[in-house]
Image: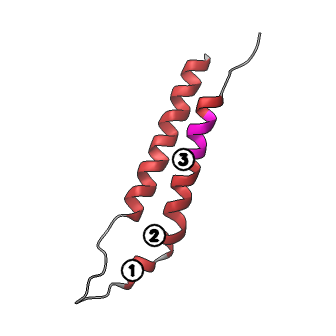
Amino acid sequence: MTASMVRTVIYTLSTLLILNGLFLMSGDGSDYETFRPEIFSATRIRIAPALCFFGYLLVILGIMYRGKDK
């Protein structure tokens, strides 16, 4: 695989991770009339931000990836 192909795969994976994290964080919030305790679920507070964080780390890795020297 060439370096540009590896970078493309890394960027694609990182984009999917970030989009999945943002999707898991989305949802209804609370307002003054109703309180929804699901906004404090483990998925929204721990898992989704971790997915976004690892996605951004992969973006940095994709930027810094050099490929194999021959």
Residue to which mark 1 is pinned:
38
Q: CA distance from mark 3 to mark 2?
A: 16 Å
Mark 2 = which residue? 44
Residue marked by disc 3:
55
The answer to whether residue 41 is visible is yes
Q: Magenta segment: does it hold 58?
A: yes
- Residue 51 higher or lower than 35, as above or below: above
Give the residue at x 77% y 9%: 70
Question: In the displayed structure, does residue 23 sit left or right of residue 8?
Answer: left
Q: Are marks 1 and 2 in contact (CB under 8 Å)?
A: yes
Q: Earlier in the sequence, mark 3 or mark 2?
A: 2
Residue type marked 1: Glu
Q: Measured from the top left, where is residue 13 in percent x and y?
A: 51, 39
Residue 1 can be seen in this image: no
Residue positioned 54% across, 68% down in the render? 46
Q: Which residues are magenta?
A: 55-61
Q: Position of residue 29 (x, y in %)?
A: 31, 75
SS at mark 1 in the image: helix
